[in-house]
Image: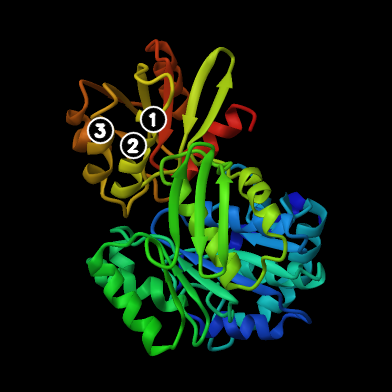
Amino acid sequence: MTYDEAVAALSRYGGRGWRLGLDRMQEFVRRLPIEHWPDFVHVTGTNGKGSVTAIVQSVLVEQGWTTGAYFSPYVYDLCERVQLGRGLIPREDFARLVAEIIPVAETLEDEPWGGLTEFEFKTGLGFLFWSRSSCDAVALEVGLGGRLDATNIVDPASSVIVSVGLDHTEILGDTLDKIAVEKAGIVKPGRPVVVGDLPPIAMGPVARIAAELESPLWRYGHEVVLTRGLDGWGVSTPGGSYERLVPGIAGKWQPHNMALAIAACEAAGRIKQRSKVRLGVGKASLPGRFQRVSHQGHDYLLDGAHNEDAAQALVDSLRELPEWPVKTVLLTGMLSGHAASGFYEPLATLVDEAHFVPIDFHRSRDPLELEREVGWLFERSLAHKSLEEGLEAALSAGAGLVLVTGSYYLVGEVGRKLGL
């Protein structure tokens, strides 16, 4: 099976969407020939979970461990999903594992568990790949929520809850405390959990669940402390202190995310060379997160923000750019299931002109419908029939910066057009 054939074979699983529940995933993994399970650092959060996962990955690599990583979603390349070291799974390995796993997946089709989703298939592929690669540790990002996510069949060395905000409310609940319970579903008995800067209404359920499970709780601002120095950031945890840290991923919230990642590696017992933590933090990278790109004389900033909290973080980060203020034109689209007004209101404080485009995904919002709903927030807004038309219009507006945001799927499409 070639890589392209493997991608085509996976497409039959894609139409099943999300299925929250662990019974089928547990049975699927039981049937796979997995002989070795690494330590996992399991990461969830409404925003920032990808960044924390990437920093954990990079720190573990610099510690000398054979390191895997799992990211959701991928942005430019399907193979971003499953990684070894800092590299994507080789396409030949991906294709070989797809061919090997399909017969196993088919055994579930006519049984009570039913057929796999694409996310479950890829997650199982990751577990098998890391087993065959003899990984010591894996930075494992949750797909959606936590408690019923397909990744939540592991018993991690440590867990991380980066943030809790209102997103996917139709699935996870319509209040912060309900969503916090879903996120805290990744906490396991006796295993440390590192928690970010949560609002009190979300911290309450997390602390309660950690106490019930007798899981050590490392809270940002308490057990995990971030300080600002003249030559970088300092982080102290129950396991140690670190100085002169500069995160390799840009954005206002990245020092916070860095602190959680370091604490998670400490809590997992995977820091053996403290002097190399700084190097790991600095080498961390992640596509589609406050990513600056220059292409054919135009400057772009690509960011997968798609909810209100992420939009505000994006605005705060833009204001910290050395060249700010700069004329910025918005190229955007959104999937159904996200609150449009809450997302675009913060952006409208910085952006005068918005161009709404379709996304090549079955849940794409109609650009005209989206423009009618939120276009009034901007001095000028236009809906376009295609991404190409919208991109041309945005470039013609004389922007110093084209801001591409609203969906990782859109960021991926634009990035691929820019050769990323």
Which corner quadrant holds the N terminus? Answer: bottom right
In the rendered view, does 123 fall on the left or right side of 392?
right
Dot 2 amino acid type: Asp
Give SS at disc 1.
Answer: loop
Q: Amino acid at mark 1?
A: Glu
Spatial CA distance of label 3 from label 2 is: 24 Å
Q: Closer to the N terminus: mark 1 or mark 3?
A: 1
Q: Position of residue 373 (x, y in %)?
A: 20, 38
Q: Secondary structure at mark 2?
A: helix
Is 244 displayed left or right of 318 in the figure?
Answer: right
User: What residue is pinned by disc 1?
Assistant: 320
> Do callouts 3 and 2 mark residues in contact (Cβ within 8 Å)?
no
Separation of residues labelled 1 and 3 (CA atoms)? 28 Å
Circle 3 or circle 2, nearest the eye: 2
Nearest to the observer: residue 217 or residue 10 = 217
Q: Residue at x 69, y 69 (%)?
A: 137
Q: Quadrant of residue 348?
A: top left
> Left or right of 305: which side holds 205?
left
- Pair 1/3: label in front: 1
Query: Where in the figure is residue 338, as x and y percent of width and height?
Result: 31, 51
Q: Which residue is mark 2?
A: 316
**Of marks 3 and 2, which one's residue comes earlier in the chain?**
2
Reading the image, the residue beneath label 3 is: 371
Residue 262 lies in what quarter of the image?
A: bottom right
| Amino acid type indicated by mark 3 | Glu
Query: Does the residue at mark 1 contact the one at mark 2 (Cβ under 8 Å)?
Result: yes
Image quarter (top left, top right, bottom left or bottom right) of the C terminus: top right
Q: Which residue is pictured at 32% across the width and 62% down the height?
A: 198
- Residue 35 picture location, percent across and down: 79, 82
Look at the image and tell me whether residue 215 can be seen.
yes
Question: Residue 59, labelled with which disc?
Answer: none
